Image (cartoon, rainbow, N blue to C red):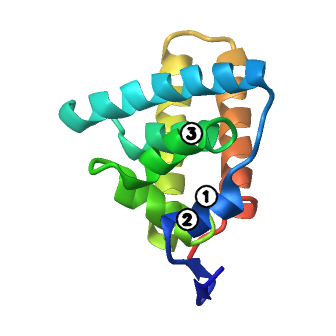
Amino acid sequence: MSEVGGRLESVDEIVERYMRKSSTKQRTRYVVLGWVFVAFAIIGIWVPGWPTVSWAVPAAYLFSISDEKYFRWSLTNKFFGPALFEYYATGKTIPKHAKIWIIVTMTVMSGLSIWLATIAGDPGYGQAFIAVAWAVGFWWLVYKVDSR
């Protein structure tokens, strides 16, 4: 593999590093679920506010553990292929500014959800669940998701 500064330079290198085999039964499930995620990603091409790459990333992952042809397609298609290629080529990292904005957005939306649950009269269980989900997401982003 020819890595330049820790970055993979071709689709073949990415496939070689990340492609995994699964059983036939699992393969079928992963391919079907991957195409469901692709369908959601395609919706995001035309519907404002609906994410595209956020759906394409799990689709690419599912293809990477099930079908090389579909994994290659996910890295090279014209709609979200460039973003997925960049994600895999840089070692599955996200830009630091994107990570910060994800955390800010997640915090604001969780705070808003807690406030609305309180107004709706929830005795505290909903707010606690939202706070725990936020804490887990925050921890995951800070400690488990690498940034560049």
Residue drawn where x is 68% and y is 51% of the image: 19
Residue 136 horizontal side relative to residue 98, left or right: right
Q: Quadrant of the C terminus?
A: bottom right
Q: Amino acid at mark 2?
A: Asp
Q: Residue at x 69, y 26 (%)?
A: 27
Q: If you read the primary sequence from the N terminus, does the residue marked by circle 1 or circle 3 appear first?
A: 1
Give the amino acid at mark 1: Val
Pointer 2: what residue? Answer: 12
Mark 3 or mark 2: whose residue is earlier in sequence: 2
In this rendering, the label closer to the viewer, 3 or 2: 2
- Specify whether 74 is left or right of 51: right
Relative to 98, does residue 36 appear above or below in the rendering?
above
The 10 Å Cα crowd at callout 3, few under 14, some 14 to 19, many 20 or more, is some
Kindly report the distance in space between the C-alpha atoms of the residues bearing marks 2 and 1: 5 Å
Q: Is residue 92 left or right of residue 82?
A: right
Residue 88 is left or right of residue 17, and the answer is left
Q: Kindly report the distance in space between the C-alpha atoms of the residues bearing marks 3 and 2.
A: 20 Å
The numbered mark at residue 15 is: 1
Residue 18 vs 58, above or below: the answer is below
> Residue 63, percent across and down?
59, 38
Contact? badges 2 and 1 (CB < 8 Å)? yes
Please tell me the numbered disc located at residue 70.
none
- Picture coordinates of residue 41, whole percent (x, y): 37, 34
Q: Residue 36: where, in percent of width, then height?
A: 47, 22
Q: Which residue is mark 3?
A: 58
Q: Quadrant of residue 2?
A: bottom right
Graded by Cα atoms within 10 Å as few (under 14), some (14 to 19) or many (20 or more), the crowding at tag 2 reads: few
Viewport quadrant of the N terminus: bottom right
Q: Position of residue 75 (x, y in %)?
A: 45, 53
